[in-house]
Image (cartoon, rainbow, N blue to C red):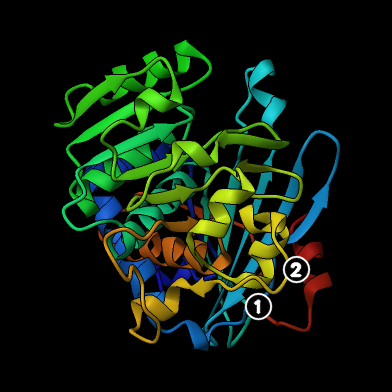
Amino acid sequence: MINLAPSEKALVPFVSVENMMKLIHHIGLETMLVGLGDYIESDFRRWELFDKTPRVASHSEKGVIELMPTSDGDVYGVKYVNGHPSNTADGLQTVTAFGLLANVANGYPVLLSEMTLLTALRTAATSAIVARVLAPKDAHVMAMIGNGAQSEFQTLAMKAIVGIDEVRLYDIDPAATAKCAANLAGHGIKVVACDAAEEAMLGAQIVTTCTADKQYATILTDNMVGSGIHINAIGGDCPGKTELAPAILRRAGIFVEYPEQTRIEGEIQQLSADHPVTEIWQVLTGRAKGRTDAKQITLFDSVGFAIEDFSALRYVRDQIKATGLFDPLDLLADPEDPRDLFGMLQRAL
């Protein structure tokens, strides 16, 4: 909990976009990615304690608005997030989000935070902690197919957590690749801009796909994927939106966050409902095997899950204690007599 002065007990700590950026720079981007990864892995290891449900989604022709709730029994967390691929044409973000933590014992919120930036960081951290256990040993080159808002975060998380030292970039929009390459300059990683997805995959042990169009797409065809690579598929994240040829899925060992959600939203929506998958928490706890041999294709079919957001909010809650990078938000009514809400209103005249 945040320790507030007695007169501020009813105020909720709020982390704005401005303060989130300050917090990231205060901690250091790569250090924060590592820290988020540690919190996410820690919560995955206690997976069975959490309430789990597929996200509550409202779909439209333009995109989707979702709520992502969970609780570990002591703290409740929920994230509001949208996904609107056409937003960029209007100069808007494809994804925006905010999140909340609350005390289960009394229902009072204990943190409200922006999560547009935080979601990008938690998604990248999750990708990297999974790649650390599934990717080929000593993997050091990643192909980044799709160079939009997630690409730099994904790259730097793989550098900080997995140890990659080269990223090969491709996007159908050359301006996106140029943007990503420029942003990654000076971050201690070799950046190679490519003219085709096949070129980007040359020599890569990890392939991350992250495109935005809400449609069944084939970013990777079967003949592009050789043995022994790890695919980090994060772009297919809602019904009707995929990136991989079904034949790749049938050749790969598939790892997911929460099957009940991934079968609706992930790459495996293209497969039968009984196609075998492994939950990644089971790998992290040693209950299931990850990569079984050097020639195996491993696929993390990641759609994002509420426990990851819970972990990220928990990390932020703990970090802001010492920094003061939050604003006390007057969100909760706090009458002197809990039974006299009307009296509080009258005394405000």
Lateral position of residue 322 relative to residue 118, left or right: left
**Who's the residue at 33% across and 66% down the image?**
318
According to the picture, the residue beneath numbered tag 2 turns out to be 344
Vertical position of residue 325 compared to residue 341: above or below: above
Residue 25 in sight: no
Q: Looking at this view, is 328 or 170 the one in front? A: 170
**Who's the residue at 35% across and 83% down the image?**
285
Quarter assignment of residue 205:
top left
Q: Looking at the rendering, in which quadrant would you find the C terminus?
A: bottom right
| Residue 336: mark in rendering | 1
The x and y percentages for residue 334 are 65, 71
Lateral position of residue 259 relative to residue 162, left or right: right
Residue 144 in sight: yes
The x and y percentages for residue 29 are 26, 43
Q: Looking at the rendering, in which quadrant would you find the N terminus?
A: bottom left
The x and y percentages for residue 194 are 36, 18
Q: What element carries label 1?
A: loop
Cα distance between the residues tagged 1 and 2: 8 Å
The x and y percentages for residue 136 are 25, 56
Q: Which amino acid does label 2 sit on?
A: Met
Quarter assignment of residue 289:
bottom left
Classify 10 Å Cα crowding around label 2: few (below 14), some (14-19), many (20 and above).
Answer: some
Q: Which amino acid does label 1 sit on?
A: Glu
Vertical position of residue 68 compared to residue 195: above or below: below
Lateral position of residue 66 relative to residue 107, left or right: right
Mark 1 vs 2, N-terminal side: 1
**Who's the residue at 63% across and 79% down the image?**
107
Classify 10 Å Cα crowding around label 1: few (below 14), some (14-19), many (20 and above).
Answer: few
What number of labels is visible? Answer: 2
Mark 1 vs 2: CB contact within 8 A = yes
| Residue 233: mark in rendering | none
Q: Looking at this view, is 157 or 270 the one in front? A: 270
